[in-house]
Image: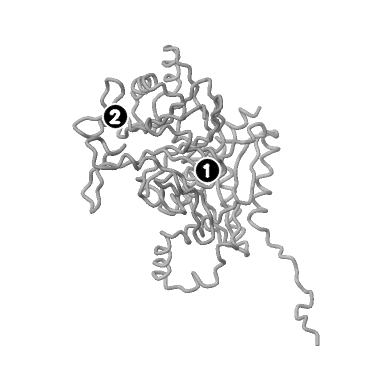
């Protein structure tokens, strides 16, 4: 009896993951700044949103929110903390290699969307956005990331880094 | 090496007090929060007294300013809205200095503040020798300072790490607890009076913390909440003289030879 039920009919998902999109956007900065400033996307060792939930003193709050929401789908079926993928996005200079301005984190589960963005407070203020943004799909995510990368705050830091990396 | 931190409460005329403080306590690194006076004027005034300092340039962080003696190597590493970290080197002393001005829970949401605290703790954990100082807008006993998911800073030199739910994290040492107690002195760096259910009057919002490996460099007995600068009293009518600043400076000394 053949127990293979899969028939090898899997297709690779064509959905771009948030970190891949971020890399594509960030990589442009190197040439735009005449090879002086880089925007990097790197895997981050902590899942910070879940750390909040699992923190001992946050346990009660998490349970409280759960009880308040009374929407079981908010919790059941969610990917657990260890299955989240977190990336840090930061600026650095080619000569100032130890310098790091971390302008945001992105975090998603096994499914790429929704993706959460934890944003630098000053950029959030400038964009009149919350410091934690949730994007439900790629379109929302791309719009948010574009706004972040072209913010005045980012421009100021990039110009400063260009000056000392000349 | 002598290091001081002071939240200067946006006072435009703070430089005259800073010059006295730097000269009197022979401060090598002065870390400032809410500094809105002219940094270049401060450097120039010190220069005329044969005291040679540089202003550390940051690109992102507007909440912290640092001036350091010109024989100290200061390299900016982390440069975020709420904190910076500098690699400090002089003679045999080599460490990472984190300087922070965290917002209060009331200003930002609690979750937003926690993310910043966790981010800073993750950056601290990359260094064996680190000194963390600043206005944390929390007392040493409050959750964001003590909790495993916060800065994880405790008043013990003995415990080095702790495991919660299989995750292991280094414990930072917080020597500021020693300023609590029923002393006939000023038990804090910030005075606040309100009519809420809980009111401490005196708070130790301005703190220094150390990684375990760096404790041996701390000159314990010199750690101080500064209440007067030579002949200038920072206390008036038993509370902080807000004409100067609403916070008191803190002072720490590190051994350069160990």
Q: Position of residue B39 (x, y in %)?
A: 44, 23
Residue drawn at x 39%, y 29% is B36
Q: How many marks?
A: 2
> Which mark is on residue A82?
none
How far, Cα to Cα, is label 2 from label 1? 30 Å
Q: Which residue lies furthest to the right in this view?
A: A1
Judge whether B37 appears above or below A66 on screen. above
Q: Position of residue A60 (x, y in %)?
A: 39, 64
Chain that bears disc 1 = B
Q: How crowded is mark 1: few (under 14 residues within 10 Å), some or many (20 or more)?
A: many
Chain that bears disc 2 = B
Judge whether A103 appears above or below A77 on screen. above
Find out whether the residues at labels 2 and 1 contact each other: C-beta distance under 8 Å: no
Q: Which residue bears the numbered disc 1?
A: B124
Q: Residues within 10 Å of mark 2 (few under 14, many from 20)?
A: some
Q: Quadrant of residue B179?
A: top left
Residue drawn at x 61%, y 53% is A142
Q: Position of residue A131 (x, y in %)?
A: 48, 50
Judge whether B186 appears above or below A148 on screen. above
Q: Quick check: B128 left or right of B7?
A: right
Q: Which residue bears the numbered disc 2?
A: B227
Q: Quick check: A86 left or right of B133?
A: right
Q: Quadrant of residue A97?
A: top right
Q: Which residue lies furthest to the left in this view?
A: B237
Q: Position of residue A50 (x, y in %)?
A: 51, 60
Residue drawn at x 48%, y 36% is B216
Residue drawn at x 54%, y 60% is B166
């Amino acid at each position: 009896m053949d127990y293979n039920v899969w028939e090898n009919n899997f297709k690779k998902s064509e959905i771009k993951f948030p970190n891949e999109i971020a890399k594509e956007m960030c990589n442009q900065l190197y040439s735009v700044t005449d090879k002086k400033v880089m925007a990097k996307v790197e895997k981050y060792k902590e899942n910070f949103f879940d750390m909040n939930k699992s923190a001992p003193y946050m346990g009660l709050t998490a349970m409280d929110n759960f009880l308040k929401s009374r929407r079981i789908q908010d919790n059941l079926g969610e990917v657990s903390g260890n299955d989240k993928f977190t990336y840090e996005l930061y600026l650095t200079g080619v000569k100032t290699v130890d310098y790091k301005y971390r302008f945001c984190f992105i975090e998603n589960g096994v499914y790429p969307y929704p993706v959460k963005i934890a944003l630098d407070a000053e950029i959030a203020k400038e964009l009149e956005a919350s410091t934690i943004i949730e994007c439900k799909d790629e379109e929302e995510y791309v719009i948010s990331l574009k706004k972040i990368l072209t913010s005045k705050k980012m421009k100021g830091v990039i110009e400063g880094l260009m000056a000392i990396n000349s | 090496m002598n290091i001081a931190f002071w939240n200067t409460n946006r006072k435009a005329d703070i430089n005259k007090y800073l010059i006295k403080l730097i000269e009197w306590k022979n401060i090598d690194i002065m870390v400032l929060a809410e500094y809105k006076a002219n940094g270049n004027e401060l450097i120039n005034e010190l220069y005329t007294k044969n005291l040679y300092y540089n202003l550390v340039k940051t690109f992102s962080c507007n909440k912290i300013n640092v001036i350091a003696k010109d024989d100290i190597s200061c390299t900016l590493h982390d440069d975020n809205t709420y904190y910076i970290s500098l690699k400090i080197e002089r003679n045999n002393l080599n460490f990472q200095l984190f300087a922070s001005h965290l917002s209060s829970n009331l200003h930002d949401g609690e979750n937003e503040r926690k993310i910043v605290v966790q981010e800073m703790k993750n950056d601290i954990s990359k260094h064996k020798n680190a000194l963390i100082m600043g206005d944390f807008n929390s007392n040493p006993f409050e959750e964001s300072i003590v909790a495993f998911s916060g800065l994880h800073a405790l008043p013990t030199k003995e415990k080095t790490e702790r495991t919660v739910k299989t995750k292991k994290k280094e414990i930072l040492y917080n020597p500021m607890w020693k300023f609590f107690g029923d002393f006939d002195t000023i038990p804090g760096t910030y005075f606040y009076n309100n009519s809420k259910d809980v009111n401490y009057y005196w708070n130790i919002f301005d703190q220094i913390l150390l990684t375990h490996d760096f404790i041996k460099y701390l000159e314990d007995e010199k750690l101080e909440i500064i209440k007067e600068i030579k002949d200038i009293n920072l206390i008036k009518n038993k509370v902080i003289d807000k004409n100067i600043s609403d916070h008191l400076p803190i002072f720490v000394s590190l051994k350069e030879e160990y």
